[in-house]
Every structure is written in structure tokens, then in C-alpha cells.
Amino acid sequence: MYKNILLPTDHSELADKANDQGLTLARMLGAKVTILTIFEPLRGIVAEGVVIPIPEEARQAVVKKIEFDLKKVAARAAAQKVPCDTAQVEADQPWRAIVDEAQKRACDLIIMASHGRRGVSALILGSETQKVLTHSKIPVLVYR
């Protein structure tokens, strides 16, 4: 069955629940997991034609916060005795980074949360989960 599961997360409450379900499934299957966080590049602020760069310290603070959050999920994996890797990727299109990382890491299942937007908000905001479902050749299990 599944041996290598990707758990993309934004560390929201719903994503944490999806991660817990993914860890439980991985334990039952004897699979390993990779917990992945995607963050969008920090860009400078443009004000009246002047670009104010984001200080490197701010970028490092984001990276450290993500590392802290990933360690918390990895600790939950260790508690369930599930082999676990963590990764963070900086990307403009989170859905594409998820699909690419799953392929690069030879994952055979992606488990991710859906925030369940409907109607106009789903149309305007889009859905990273929907985009992963549309573009992934790897099976995707969606937790709601």
C-alpha cells in the first residue's frame, strides 16, 4: 500500500488535524512521512515607486517559526513511532511546490486539509488543495 506519505501543512488547526490523521494512517501502514511547509517569498514593500526591502532578519524569523512548527509535528510523529522528515520550501505557488516535492521525494500519497471555502470566496481565493487535486498524478487524500 502506501509507504511514503507527504503531509503539507500551513500549521492551522485544520491542518494539524489532517496531520494527526496522516500520522495515524502512516503508523497503521508502516509508512514514513514528510511534513512540508511552503512559504511565499517575502518581497519588498513598494511605496510611491520606492522599494523598501524586507530585512534578512525578518526572513530568518519566518524560517525559524516554520522550523519550530515543523518540530512540533515531528515530535507527534516520533510519539507514534512514525519515521519522519521535515521540509520547508519557499515558493510563489504553494500547490506547485507540493506536487513537485511529492514527486521529488517519491511519495505515493499526499494527505492535506481543505479549508472548505465555497461559492464566491472559493472562486476568488482559489484553493491550494483543489489545485493539488487537479495537477497531482499522486493520489491525494483530503481531510475536512
Image: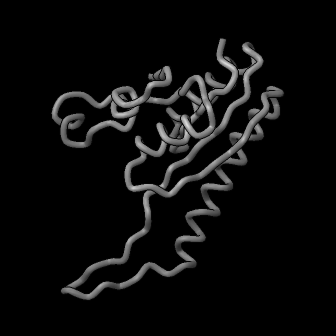
* Residue occupying the point 48% across, 22% down: 140
One can see residue 68 in this view: yes
Q: Considering depth in this image, is 34 or 136 the residue closer to the camera?
A: 136
Residue at image location 32% in from the left, 77% down from the top: 45
Is 65 situated left or right of 71 in this image?
left
Which quadrant does the N terminus fall into?
top right
Task: Give the residue displayed 50% in from the left and 32% down from the top.
Answer: 14
Q: Is residue 80 above or below residue 70?
A: above
In which image quadrant can residue 34 be found?
top right
- The spot of residue 43 in percent (x, y) is 38, 71
Q: Quadrant of residue 60?
A: bottom right
> Which residue is outermost to the left?
120
Image height of 67 relative to 26, above or below: below
Residue at the image point whose x is 55% and y is 43% from the top: 11
Q: Image check: 14 left or right of 22?
A: left
Q: Indicate the position of residue 90 as horizontal and vertical percent values.
A: 50, 57
Left or right relative to 40: residue 57: right
Q: Say which of 23 and 32 sits in front.
A: 32
Q: Is residue 143 visible?
A: no
Coloration mode: one colour
From the top left corner, tell me how far across and down residue 111 is, in percent.
Answer: 54, 26
Task: Please say if 142 is above or below 44.
Answer: above
Q: Quadrant of the C terminus?
A: top left
Q: What is the tally of numbered marks visible in this picture?
A: 0
Q: Position of residue 18 (x, y in %)?
A: 55, 27
